[in-house]
Amino acid sequence: MKITARVPNSTKFSAPTVLRKDTPFLGATVGAWDAAMTGHMQEKLNEVKQIAATGPKRKVSDAKSFDVASIAGQLLAANAK
């Protein structure tokens, strides 16, 4: 059975608005939600960029890689004995 719903044009978002920080939204203000969701994101991003810029440089071609599935299979086989 297929259910279809008809939404009248009057309830669609015809003119989106920008909310102010003091606008109430879901029991708090928009500013409080913004702070909770993003926190100190810009400061953390700057920290990561600084660490990346000043940290040791590594060649990608020298990186050791492995196949997780193969290692898991080997461990399971070893434990089955």
Image (cartoon, rainbow, N blue to C red):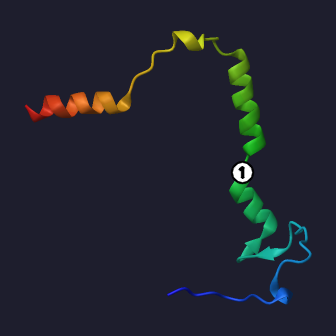
Seen at 63% across and 87% down, the residue is 4
Quarter of the image with the C terminus is top left
Amino acid type, callout 1: Gly
- How many callouts does the rendering have? 1
Label 1 sits on a secondary structure element that is loop
Residue 34 in which image quadrant:
bottom right
Question: Taking 35 as reference, is 21 left or right?
Answer: right
Residue at the left extreme? 81
Residue with the most extreme front position:
1
**Horizontal and vertical percent position of residue 2:** 54, 85
- Classify 39 as above or below 60: below
Residue at 69% x, 30% y is 48
**Residue 72: quarter of image:** top left
Name the residue rendered at 86%, 66% in the picture: 21
Residue 46 percent coordinates (x, y): 76, 32
Comparing 67 with 48, the one in front is 67
Q: Is residue 60 above or below residue 10?
A: above
Residue drawn at point x = 85 percent, y = 74 percent: 23
Figure quadrant of residue 71: top left
Relative height, residue 25 to residue 42 (above, below): below
Residue to which mark 1 is pinned: 39
Q: Nearer the viewer, residue 19 or 78?
A: 78
How many neighbours does mark 1 have within 10 angstroms: few (below 14), some (14-19), or many (20 or more)?
A: few
Q: Is residue 3 left or right of residue 14?
A: left
Give the percent coordinates (x, y) of residue 49. Answer: 73, 27
